Image (tube, rainbow, N blue to C red):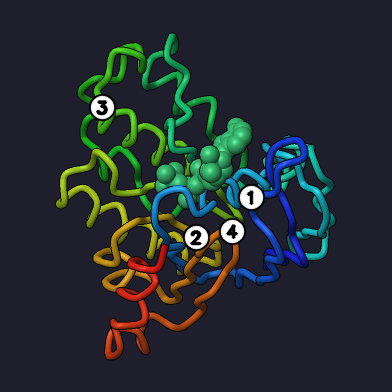
Amino acid sequence: MLEIENLRAGYAKTTVVDDVTITFEAGTVTALLGRNGVGKTTLLRAMFGLCDRQSGRMSIDGVELPAGRAEVPARHGMTLLPDDRGVFATLTIEENLRLATRRGYHPPVDVKELFPLLVERAEQPAGQLSGGQKQQVGIARAILAGQRFIAIDELSQGLQPSLAQATLEALRVVASTGVGVLFVEQSPRYPLAYADRIIGMVKGRLVLDRSADELRTDPAAVTELLVVS
Ligand SMILES: Nc1ncnc2c1ncn2[C@@H]1O[C@H](COP(=O)(O)OP(=O)(O)OP(=O)(O)O)[C@@H](O)[C@H]1O
């Protein structure tokens, strides 16, 4: 369980995300929705110690996550796939996967079955791949490393729909073993189809937090969120 209390974060003196208090339960798939520039990436970066936490507390399974210490979430099995995909460009696909593998952890899905590219192009440097192909390597790395919590920015970006759907089905299998999953999208399509819970952000604050089941019968709440500026 990942707990965030009164988080305020941004860059130097600029506050982008404010007043965020939320708990991510183990085994739950949560989607974070919001328009361009509302602060979704900054929230993820703050959760992983990658931007300035101006106030607030965070913990995973009771272990405090100190501000500005990106190695602590990683040590506790939390992994972030950033929107630039976070692959090591000069290393091969196979080396990228090997580096992400956690000793003693065997994820419940085979990433090489999920993305055949990982086998077909195993020896190719990741820097030579297209954006969508890098996304596959990044998602595979996140599944290999994310023993407790996986966050994926702009999950469907650059992925053909069949791969986005296969990824989300795989993440649901991963979540069923107790891993918390959070993915960011700008459109409600995949959140409504695959998430357990949908949270929404406007101007750096969380303004929506509902079960996806509820929102499937009342999608207007999600649509409104995406038209509010
Ligand atoms: N490194 C940075 N330094 C200063 N301001 C930044 C930095 N990165 C982002 N911002 C600002 O923070 C605000 C929120 O950006 P952020 O990328 O978190 O939003 P987002 O919801 O993820 O948007 P998008 O979907 O376009 O990535 C924007 O006003 C942006 O200009």
Q: Residue furthest front?
A: 229
In this image, 16 relative to 174: left or right?
right
Q: Is mark 1 within 8 Å of ligand 1?
A: yes
Q: Secondary structure at mark 3?
A: helix
| Residue at 61 percent of width and 43 percent of height | 45
Q: Which residue is mark 1?
A: 16
Q: Which residue is mark 3?
A: 119
Tag 4: amino acid: Gly
In this image, 121 relative to 171: left or right?
left
The dot on residue 99 is: none
Q: Secondary structure at mark 4?
A: loop
Q: Secondary structure at mark 1?
A: strand
| Sequence-first tag of 3 and 1 | 1
- Where residue 70 appears, as percent x and y from the top left, is 72, 36
Quick one: label 4, few (<14), some, or many (20+) residues within 10 Å? Answer: many
Q: Is mark 4 within 8 Å of ligand 1?
A: yes
| Sequence-first tag of 3 and 4 | 3
Q: Which residue is mark 4?
A: 204
Quarter of the view holding residue 191: bottom left
